[in-house]
């Protein structure tokens, strides 16, 4: 059964090009900043709306989008040593479900689980991730303004899903500003 975990990880990475092909054009872009335990993150992302509506009721519906992102992390306690830093580049792709109004304005809630690939293994403070492949999940809420801007906050978690130990996970509080084209 140990061989199954790497096969699933490789399969998920191989699926990324197909996911990008399913999202031929981006219709919004965002800048995100996040902070966790002795780690900060800045990320840029592009989104492609699914143009689907499920569970339409009372002027609200469930929809979603693809989120392709590129981030930079800075750990402030590399290998649990004060004053030592670790910089990591992270790329990711996440399908995100969003509960929103029919006109896509006002308050919304969203959640997503995607895949990420790290430039190196994370080893900061007392948190270690033993694989470069990680799952990235989040839950958040925000507000879409009439001028095409939206602001949101989310809790973001990275983990390899128990494929390999150690797997302490990394958590962030993230603020996001996005602009719809």
Image: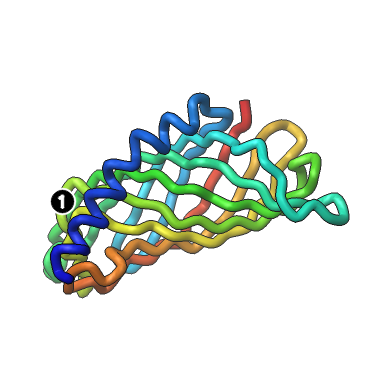
Residue sitting nearer the eye, 135 or 109: 135
* Quadrant of the rendering where the N terminus is positioned: bottom left
Q: On screen, 91 above or below 159?
A: above
Q: How many marks?
A: 1
Residue drawn 85% across and 50% down?
A: 59
**Color encoding of the figure:** rainbow
Residue 95 located left or right of residue 166: right
* Quadrant of the rendering where the C terminus is positioned: top right
Residue 60 located left or right of residue 38: right
Residue drawn 40% across and 40% down?
A: 69
Q: Which residue extends farthest right?
A: 58
Res. 64 visible in picture: yes
Q: Position of residue 78 (x, y in %)?
A: 15, 62
Residue sitting nearer the eye, 165 or 140: 165
Res. 123 visible in picture: no
Q: Position of residue 52 (x, y in %)?
A: 67, 41
Q: Position of residue 24 (x, y in %)?
A: 49, 26
- The 10 Å Cα crowd at callout 1, few under 14, some 14 to 19, many 20 or more, is some
Residue 48 located left or right of residue 160: right
Query: What is the secondary structure assignment of the residue under circle 1?
Result: loop
Residue 12 located left or right of residue 1: right
Residue drawn 52% across and 36% down?
A: 47
Tell me the residue that label 1 is attached to: 120
Q: On screen, 160 above or below 68?
A: below
Q: Quadrant of residue 49?
A: top right
Residue drawn 31% across and 49% down?
A: 12
Q: Position of residue 147 (x, y in %)?
A: 73, 32
């Amino acid at each position: 059964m140990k061989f199954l975990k790497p096969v699933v990880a490789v399969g998920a990475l191989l699926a990324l090009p197909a996911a990008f092909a399913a999202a031929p054009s981006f219709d919004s872009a965002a800048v995100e900043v996040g902070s966790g335990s002795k780690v900060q993150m800045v990320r840029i992302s592009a989104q492609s709306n699914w143009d689907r509506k499920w569970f339409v009721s009372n002027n609200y519906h469930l929809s979603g989008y693809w989120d392709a992102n590129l981030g930079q992390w800075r750990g402030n306690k590399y290998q649990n040593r004060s004053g030592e830093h670790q910089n990591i580049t992270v790329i990711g792709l996440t399908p995100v479900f969003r509960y929103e109004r029919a006109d896509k304005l006002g308050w919304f809630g969203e959640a997503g689980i995607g895949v990420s690939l790290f430039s190196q293994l994370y080893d900061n403070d007392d948190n270690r991730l033993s694989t470069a492949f990680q799952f990235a999940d989040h839950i958040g809420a925000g507000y879409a303004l009439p001028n095409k801007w939206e602001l949101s906050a989310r809790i973001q978690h990275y983990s390899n899903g128990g494929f390999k130990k150690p797997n302490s996970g990394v958590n962030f509080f993230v603020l996001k500003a996005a602009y719809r084209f």
